[in-house]
Image (spheres, rainbow, N blue to C red):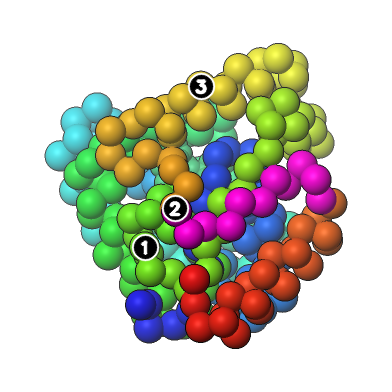
Amino acid sequence: MPKHPVIAIDGPAGSGKSTAARLLARKLGYTHVDTGALYRTVTWLAIERGVDLADERALAAVVPAIHVRFEPSADGQRVFSGPRDISREIRTPELTRQVRFAAVSPLVRKALVPVQREFAERGPCVMEGRDIGTVIFPDAQVKFYLDAPLRVRAERRWKELVAAGKSATLEEVEREEAARDESDLKRATAPLRKADDAIVVDTGRFDIDGMVEHLARLTGERLKGGGA
Ligand code: DC
């Protein structure tokens, strides 16, 4: 059992995990830990250092140097690596395509396990990712698996891109989301999978306030009931 309560939120890209995790963490006064940002930061720092992303050993050797810190902000969450705010750099479409090298690498995943567990040593957290309830915290007090149909997820992502002034068609975005699903679900190490004791939530059925209420209520019930 982790030292402090951990709410594990897993699910595919575009399932609404990040928004749900951020708002649930804020409502409960917990820290929001976005583990996807860790894989992105490893990728970003490797590129900065001229590391060949296909060289798994060299990529994993970057992990001890990332020093990631999260800070809540009005427009989401800011991500720092050491003193540097890299929130924008880690979310470019190019980096999003390159992050798969880190995600599929058993060595990188292994090196990131203690980094993720350490966040829960410092205090209660809402931790989101792909393998939090299965690998990182199999005994988390509360586990959610958030999902929504591919089309709904692609539409959300497309609207975000358009709002950010990027040009893309819905079909392109849907194809990219499908490719990410494929790589998340089919990789050999820690593929995206629902933990047996996770509560499945179809985020397409809620507006954001309704979803956070729903998750907070279920969290309260599980914590009161003495865990999962
Ligand atoms: O959630 P995201 O799109 O920021 O995640 C970036 C990449 O990292 C994505 O390819 C999935 C991967 N990832 C993972 O494999 N395991 C996690 N716990 C979190 C993210």
Spot occupied by residue 146 in the image (x, y as percentages of width and height): 61, 49
As shown in the figure, which amino acid type bears the numbered disc 2?
Answer: Ala
Which disc number belongs to residue 195? Answer: 2
Disc 1 and disc 2 in contact, CB within 8 angstroms: yes
> Vertical placement of 55 versus 113: above or below?
above
Report the Cα–Cα distance between label 2 and label 3.
22 Å
| Element carrying mark 3 | helix
Which residue occupies 43% across, 69% down?
140
Q: Quadrant of the N terminus?
A: bottom left
Q: Does the magenta stretch include residue 166?
A: no
Which residue occupies 58% across, 57% down?
199
As shown in the figure, which amino acid type bears the numbered disc 3?
Answer: Ala
Q: Which of marks 3 and 1 is nearer the N terminus?
A: 1
Q: Is residue 7 visible?
A: yes
Spot occupied by residue 77 in the image (x, y as percentages of width and height): 63, 60
Q: Is residue 110 left or right of residue 173?
A: left
The stretch in magenta equals: 196-206
Q: Quadrant of residue 222?
A: bottom right
Q: In this view, does 116 lie to the left or right of 79?
A: left
